[in-house]
Image (spheres, rainbow, N blue to C red):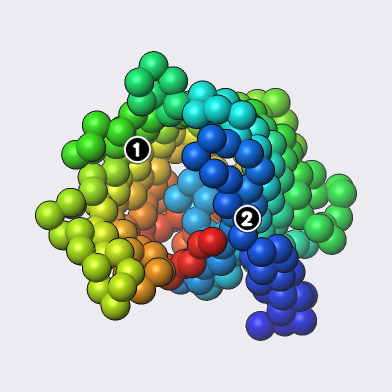
Amino acid sequence: MNRSSYYALAVVAGLAGAAPALAADDEGGFAIAGGVGFYSDYLYRGISQTDNDPAIQGSLEPSYKFSDAFQIYLNVWGSNVEFSDASIEIDVTPGVRGTVFGGLMYDVNVIYYWYPGANNNQDFEFFEPGASLAYDFGFVIPKIGFRYSPEFFADSGDAYFAFGELQVPLKFFETEVAGKPFTVTLFGHLGHQWIQHNSTFGAPDYLEWNAGVSVGMFGLTFNIGYYDTDLNKSQCFAGTKLCEGRVVGSVSASF
């Protein structure tokens, strides 16, 4: 790993530990949350951002809860990447979220994707507004969402992303191990990415999906899943393996 990659990892790890946890009470108020995770690969919508190498990712999120129906937040998230001219990605996401109508969870935000140190001529950075809706039925949590960028990654024009997700908590597994909750959740995801200038981006419009299992144990979350796209090698950034199907594992901790 080169020096810039070590620097990227240090920045991300520092981000995750930058502040102590402050919890909001049930009535609302100010809180700070965050976490850090280690991943066997960093996939963004099914495409490796680390040239099929591992990643460390961290986040920090101050928020203020006015009521169950309305909370504002600012999430700052970081990861190492392996691009021609960038070794770190930082996403800054201001947004509002809440629960309305007896359990409908909404989230409306804008993500700014920032690649410190990258040459401005690469046009890596972009904004992406989006929204999602989810509902917890107890035995299953479905979620749908949509995102739009007026100038997508690498100056590739308008881009649209629609997705659906499912989480299935296996509550019959719930117990305690060493005084910590033990949980098992199945997950699945299906998304479609549309891009105005496919030749500039390096790949055609595509489907991506994943499915796997998440286990909470010892205060940590362990994930393993299979991730894939419908892009073949010749369609994937001039014949790379970045879009191939793969198993990705991770372990993360949050506060």
| Residue that sits furthest to the left in the current view | 172
At label 2, the amino acid type is Leu
Give the camera-side residue of 126 and 239: 126
* Tag nearer the camera, 2 or 1: 2
Residue 183, position as x, y percentages in the image: 26, 60
Mark 2 element type = loop
What is the number of the mark on residue 22?
Answer: 2
Residue at image coords 29%, 77% = 178
Query: In this view of the protein, can residue 35 be seen by the observer?
Result: yes
Give the camera-side residue of 194 and 144: 144
Mark 1 element type = strand
Q: Which residue is mark 1?
A: 165
Residue 73, position as x, y percentages in the image: 65, 39
In the displayed structure image, the side of residue 174 where residue 34 appears, left or right:
right
Quarter of the image for the N terminus: give it: bottom right
Q: Residue 223's quadrant in the figure?
A: bottom left
